[in-house]
Image (cartoon, rainbow, N blue to C red):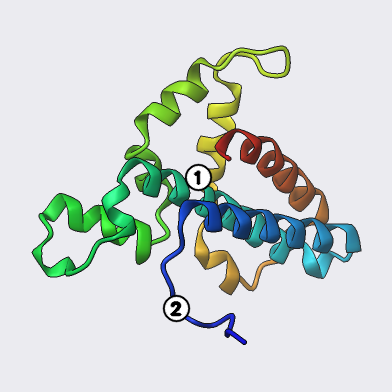
Amino acid sequence: MGSIFKKMRLRPTQLRTVAQRRFDDAECLLQKGQNARANGAMYLAGFVIECLLKAKLLEKYQWLQIAGNTGNLTTDDRRLYDLCYRMHDLAAILDHLTELGEHLKNLNSFRYEKGRLYSMLKSVVGRWTIFARYSPQMAPMQEAGDFVRQIKEIKEWLK
């Protein structure tokens, strides 16, 4: 039996599976209704966006899935590799996914006015950080609920 702690590179489909599982975890914490679980729900929900953006990055730059010796990478390619495997900088990842940003900016449907989904994504990307897992502050459940609902809307467009 494999260990959940084993370090491995994931394919985009695996990252999407992980994203869905962590979203389910966030919703479960939210449904508990215990304010002490709000931070966990928000952290996991933001992690969902990280997984989905990294899946998009791997699809766009397919060489990242098979990168061997990283010592020979150019500075730009090394930055991409680090964004995918060593960093949690959602804004920098989104900067490399300009076509996704343009699509979301121009999306205009019966559910979303033009640019709304992109604005929501930018808000999440600007707020969420891995440092939430260390925060001694406690978010109120209302804020956690709003955040998880935003993630739910965004994740449908990032799959």
Residue type at mark 2 is Lys
User: Which of the pair 43/65 is nearer the observer?
Assistant: 65
Q: Quadrant of residue 14?
A: bottom right
Q: Separation of disc 2 and disc 1 at Cα?
A: 25 Å
Q: Nearer the viewer, mark 2 or mark 1?
A: 2
Rendering coords of residue 89 (x, y %):
40, 54
Image quadrant occupied by the N terminus: bottom right
Residue position for label 1: 125
Residue position for label 2: 7
Rendering coords of residue 132 (x, y %):
58, 65
Judged from the image, the secondary structure of the residue bearing numbered disc 1 is: helix
Please rate how many residues cluster around mark 2, counting C-alpha atoms within 10 Å: few if below 14, some from 14 to 19, many from 20: few
User: Which of the pair 49/2 is nearer the observer?
Assistant: 2
Q: Is residue 18 left or right of residue 142?
A: left
Q: Is residue 28 left or right of residue 124?
A: right
Judged from the image, the secondary structure of the residue bearing numbered disc 2 is: loop
Q: Is residue 12 above or below residue 103?
A: below
User: Which of the pair 126/8 is nearer the observer?
Assistant: 8
Rendering coords of residue 25 (x, y %):
75, 63
User: Which of the pair 12/140 is nearer the observer?
Assistant: 12
Q: Quadrant of residue 134?
A: bottom right
